[in-house]
Protein backbone atom coordinates (compact mmCIF):
# COMPACT_ATOMS: atom_id res chain seq x y z
CA UNK A 1 0.00 0.00 0.00
CA UNK A 2 1.28 3.40 -0.99
CA UNK A 3 1.15 6.46 1.28
CA UNK A 4 1.91 10.00 0.07
CA UNK A 5 2.70 11.43 -3.34
CA UNK A 6 5.72 11.05 -5.56
CA UNK A 7 7.89 14.03 -6.43
CA UNK A 8 6.63 13.93 -10.01
CA UNK A 9 3.00 14.17 -8.92
CA UNK A 10 3.70 17.14 -6.64
CA UNK A 11 5.63 18.93 -9.40
CA UNK A 12 2.81 18.38 -11.91
CA UNK A 13 0.29 19.88 -9.49
CA UNK A 14 2.55 22.90 -8.99
CA UNK A 15 3.01 23.41 -12.76
CA UNK A 16 -0.71 23.20 -13.43
CA UNK A 17 -1.45 25.56 -10.54
CA UNK A 18 1.10 28.07 -11.86
CA UNK A 19 -0.44 27.94 -15.34
CA UNK A 20 -3.92 28.59 -13.96
CA UNK A 21 -2.58 31.49 -11.88
CA UNK A 22 -0.87 33.10 -14.89
CA UNK A 23 -4.04 32.88 -16.96
CA UNK A 24 -6.12 34.31 -14.12
CA UNK A 25 -3.77 37.23 -13.46
CA UNK A 26 -3.69 38.16 -17.15
CA UNK A 27 -7.48 38.40 -17.21
CA UNK A 28 -7.57 40.46 -14.02
CA UNK A 29 -5.19 43.06 -15.49
CA UNK A 30 -7.12 43.51 -18.74
CA UNK A 31 -10.21 45.31 -17.36
CA UNK A 32 -8.02 47.90 -15.64
CA UNK A 33 -6.11 48.79 -18.79
CA UNK A 34 -9.33 48.90 -20.81
CA UNK A 35 -10.91 51.24 -18.27
CA UNK A 36 -7.86 53.52 -18.41
CA UNK A 37 -7.95 53.58 -22.20
CA UNK A 38 -11.65 54.44 -22.22
CA UNK A 39 -11.18 57.12 -19.58
CA UNK A 40 -8.62 58.90 -21.75
CA UNK A 41 -10.84 58.47 -24.81
CA UNK A 42 -13.89 59.96 -23.05
CA UNK A 43 -11.90 62.97 -21.85
CA UNK A 44 -10.60 63.53 -25.39
CA UNK A 45 -14.12 63.32 -26.81
CA UNK A 46 -15.37 65.86 -24.25
CA UNK A 47 -12.56 68.25 -25.18
CA UNK A 48 -13.28 67.70 -28.87
CA UNK A 49 -16.88 68.87 -28.30
CA UNK A 50 -15.58 71.99 -26.52
CA UNK A 51 -13.20 72.69 -29.42
CA UNK A 52 -16.03 72.37 -31.94
CA UNK A 53 -18.30 74.63 -29.88
CA UNK A 54 -15.55 77.26 -29.65
CA UNK A 55 -14.97 77.13 -33.40
CA UNK A 56 -18.72 77.40 -34.08
CA UNK A 57 -19.04 80.39 -31.72
CA UNK A 58 -15.99 82.34 -32.84
CA UNK A 59 -15.29 81.12 -36.35
CA UNK A 60 -11.60 80.71 -35.53
CA UNK A 61 -9.64 77.52 -34.99
CA UNK A 62 -8.15 76.55 -31.65
CA UNK A 63 -4.35 76.58 -31.29
CA UNK A 64 -2.46 73.40 -30.46
CA UNK A 65 -2.36 74.19 -26.73
CA UNK A 66 -6.19 74.45 -26.45
CA UNK A 67 -5.82 77.58 -24.26
CA UNK A 68 -8.75 79.28 -26.00
CA UNK A 69 -11.22 76.86 -24.44
CA UNK A 70 -9.76 77.22 -20.92
CA UNK A 71 -12.62 79.35 -19.59
CA UNK A 72 -15.93 78.81 -17.84
CA UNK A 73 -17.91 78.78 -21.08
CA UNK A 74 -16.14 75.74 -22.50
CA UNK A 75 -13.82 73.40 -20.58
CA UNK A 76 -13.42 75.34 -17.35
CA UNK A 77 -10.51 77.47 -16.23
CA UNK A 78 -8.19 74.46 -15.94
CA UNK A 79 -7.90 72.19 -18.94
CA UNK A 80 -8.32 68.49 -18.15
CA UNK A 81 -5.28 66.27 -18.34
CA UNK A 82 -5.12 62.60 -19.25
CA UNK A 83 -6.63 60.78 -16.23
CA UNK A 84 -4.18 57.92 -16.69
CA UNK A 85 -0.82 59.61 -17.26
CA UNK A 86 -1.43 63.28 -16.44
CA UNK A 87 -0.27 64.23 -19.95
CA UNK A 88 -1.66 67.35 -21.58
CA UNK A 89 -3.94 67.25 -24.58
CA UNK A 90 -3.11 69.00 -27.84
CA UNK A 91 -4.87 69.40 -31.14
CA UNK A 92 -3.51 68.02 -34.40
CA UNK A 93 -5.35 68.10 -37.67
CA UNK A 94 -8.48 69.35 -35.94
CA UNK A 95 -8.56 66.39 -33.54
CA UNK A 96 -7.74 66.42 -29.83
CA UNK A 97 -4.79 64.10 -29.12
CA UNK A 98 -3.26 62.70 -25.94
CA UNK A 99 0.52 62.72 -25.99
CA UNK A 100 0.64 59.59 -23.81
CA UNK A 101 -1.93 57.63 -25.88
CA UNK A 102 -1.49 58.70 -29.51
CA UNK A 103 -3.16 55.61 -30.97
CA UNK A 104 -6.11 55.57 -28.60
Image (tube, helix red, strand yellow):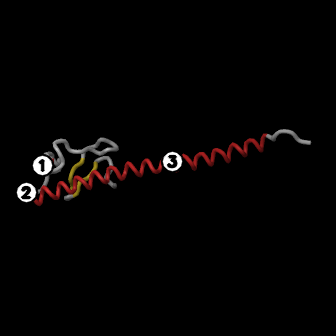
Quadrant housing residue 93: bottom left
Q: Which mark is residue 5?
A: none
Quadrant housing residue 46: bottom left
Residue placed furthest toward the right: 1
The residue beneath circle 2 is 58
Q: Which mark is residue 28?
A: 3
| Quarter of the rendering occupied by the C terminus | bottom left
The earlier-in-sequence mark between 1 and 2 is: 2
How packed mark 3 is, by other alpha carbons closer than 10 Å (few <14, some 14-19, many 20 or more), is few
Asked if the residue at tag 3 contacts the one at tag 1, i.e. Cβ–Cβ closer than 8 Å, the answer is no
* 30 horizontally vs 43: left or right: right
User: In terms of secondary structure, where does tag 3 sit?
Assistant: helix
> What's the residue at 89%, 41% (across, down)?
2
> What's the residue at 24%, 48% (across, down)?
89
> What's the residue at 33%, 42% (across, down)?
85
Asked if the residue at tag 2 contacts the one at tag 1, i.e. Cβ–Cβ closer than 8 Å, the answer is yes
The residue beneath circle 1 is 68
| Quarter of the rendering occupied by the N terminus | top right
* 19 horizontally vs 45: left or right: right
**Separation of residues labelled 1 and 3 (CA atoms):** 41 Å
Amino acid sequence: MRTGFTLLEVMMVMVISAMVAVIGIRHLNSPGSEAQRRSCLMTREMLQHHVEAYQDDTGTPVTTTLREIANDRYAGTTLPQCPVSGATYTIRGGQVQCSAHPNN
